Amino acid sequence: MKKIVIDIDETGAVRIETEGFVGKSCIEETKFLKDLLGKETAQQLTPAYFATARGCVKKHLPLCG
Amino acid sequence: MSHIAKIEIEIKDLSALKAACVRLGLEFVCDQRTYAWFGQHIGDYPIPEGFTVDDMGKCDHAIRVPGAAYEIGVIKRDRQWLLVWDFWRSGGLERVLGKSAGKLKQAYAASKAVMEARRKGYLVKEQVTKNGGIRITLSGGRA
């Protein structure tokens, strides 16, 4: 299930984590929160970000031989 | 899991700040043009950036904190609202709201996120975590 989890600590620092999204849709889904709450200071992309709706994007590198 | 972002709070919505005051039992006083503080800048700490000595104690609105002698000034600058206060401990603000009024910023962020998420049709679940944090989980809606 798709979820957006917002953690706010006692200093007012906000951490937003998305779960269950595939590809860039997580960035689009959370943009409204980032715009409303302040400015983004850090972003960490997780493996699901690089997946597409059909599956992972695979890069083929030339090997020797 | 898809991505993790960290946000530094900017206060842009006065109605969410008022809701944050209600959460914490504070009194938001509209159009109160001064806030209680030591009353004289004695040079022990630098003046906040963009302010002069004459600006000290002046505000657009104020927040009264039960149990504290001093108040918080709310000042409009460009497109956001700044919170200014005298954190001297005898004023009592830091004891109630934490360092740099962190608990007020936390309540503002929670209020704003919940208001906007509900407006967008998300199911909203709010919990207080063991370490005093607030966790808001959005599901349904567009998520």
Image (spheres, coloured by chain):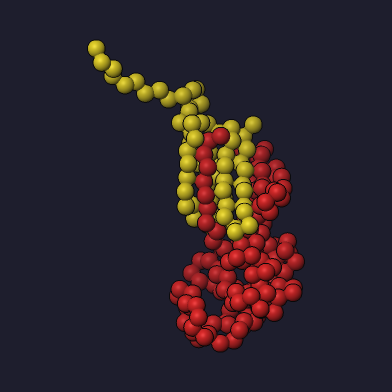
Chain colours: A yellow, B red
- Residue drawn at 51 percent across, 26 percent down: A53
Q: Nearer the viewer, residue B52 or B29?
A: B52
- What residue is rendered at 68% in x and 54% in y? B132
Across and down, in percent, residue B16 comes to: 65, 61
Q: Residue at x 55, y 58 (%)?
A: B9
Q: Picture quarter containing residue A19?
A: top right
Q: Is residue A29 above or below residue A11?
A: above
Relative height, residue B67 to residue B99 (above, below): below
Residue B36: give x, y in percent of width and height: 64, 82
Which part of the image, by quadrant, shows the N terminus of chain B? top right
Instruction: Count the labels in the image.
Output: 0
Residue B117 in sight here: yes
Quarter of the image with the C terminus of chain B is top right
User: In the picture shown, does residue A56 fall above or below B70?
Assistant: above
Residue B33 in view: no
Left or right: A59 in relation to B135:
left
In the rendered image, the vertical position of residue A41 relative to residue B56, given as above or below? above
Q: Nearer the viewer, residue B30 or B99?
A: B99
Q: Please name whichever residue, B60 or A47, is drawn nearer the observer in this view of the structure.
A: A47
Where residue A63 sits in the image (x, y, percent)? Answer: 28, 17
Q: Residue furthest left?
A: A65
User: Residue at image x 52%, y 49%?
Assistant: B6
Q: Position of residue A17 (x, y in %)?
A: 57, 42
